[in-house]
Amino acid sequence: MTMKEKLADFTQQGKALLAVNFYNFETLKGLLLAAQQTNSSLILQLSESSLHYLGIKPAIAMARVMLKEMNVEGWVHLDHGGSIEMVKECLDAGFDSVMIDASEKPFDENVRITKEAVKIAASYNANVEAELGYIAKLNQSHTFEPTSAEDAKNFVEATGVNALAIAIGNAHGFYKETPKLRLDRLKEIRAVTTCALVLHGSSGIPDEQLQEAIRCGISKINLATETKNAFMKKLQSLLANTDEIDLRKIFPNAIDEVKELIIKKLSVINA
């Protein structure tokens, strides 16, 4: 099943897929061990920064091989693609899904750019995600104006996008205080759109809010910051208490930390 089909199916069923960013072999393995042990599907995400670090072809090759090796149903997705050129390059490399993020541009320009990405992706039968509204990125102010239902409806109809990330009180990175999602706005948007709705910035959102967001219409939940944090904090604590230089003895503990985090997240989302 393609990712586009899976998301459409989950949207109809009122379920959600977990989409998790990976940064190296170790974080990738931790994610897939969790999916394997819980018999869950998983979207593997790569940001532009990760692609610059790993290389586009090595990154997707590693993801494809590991998905097959571990017998996990999963897809590879470009997270926050900043240009049509990056979208095209990832589609040519074999990505199942791409996100074109023109959310910081005026509405009409966001529509134009997203529409172009949708047109390009059609020949690849790839899923396309866009973003509408202000979802604070790292080091940006967490003040926000939620995406309006009218804008969401008009945007989806104008672009034909398969998935839409919306602003409902969420933000990228860790939260300074416990977020309170605008579930009322989510319901309004769900009522007037047919595409999959995406929740970015799930790191730090309470479990019960994530579950309620799924019940109200979210079909894809993005997780990145908590994964990085789990891996690095474990690694830092291990390295602070050992003189061991064999990374093959140190890294497995950090991989397990990622695995346990994702098992917990999957249990929340799949509840």
Image (cartoon, rainbow, N blue to C red):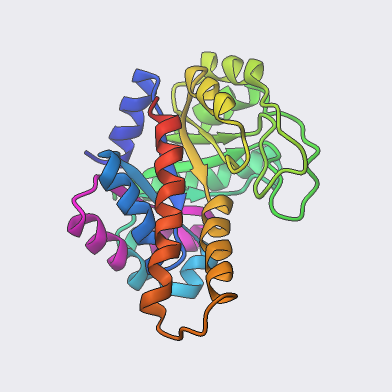
Front residue of 5/72: it is 72
Front residue of 37/135: it is 37
Q: Pick the quarter of the image with the C terminus.
A: top left
Q: Residue at x 45, y 86 (%)?
A: 245
Q: Is residue 69 visible?
A: yes
- Please identify the quarter of the rendering in which residue 177 is found: top right
Measured as percent of width and height from the top left, residue 57 is found at 34, 71
- Please identify the quarter of the rendering in which residue 82 is found: bottom right
Front residue of 57/110: it is 57
Q: Residue at x 22, y 63 (%)?
A: 65
Q: Residue at x 37, y 57 (%)?
A: 30
Q: Is residue 169 left or right of residue 29?
A: right
Measured as percent of width and height from the top left, residue 24 is found at 42, 68
- Please identify the quarter of the rendering in which residue 267 is found: top left
Q: Is residue 166 left or right of residue 262?
A: right
Measured as percent of width and height from the top left, residue 258 is found at 44, 55
Magenta stretch bounds? 61-90
Q: Is residue 10 left or right of residue 142?
A: left
Q: In the displayed structure, would residue 73 be above or below residue 133?
A: below
Q: Pick the quarter of the image with the N terminus.
A: top left
Q: Is residue 65 magenta?
A: yes
Q: Is residue 78 magenta?
A: yes
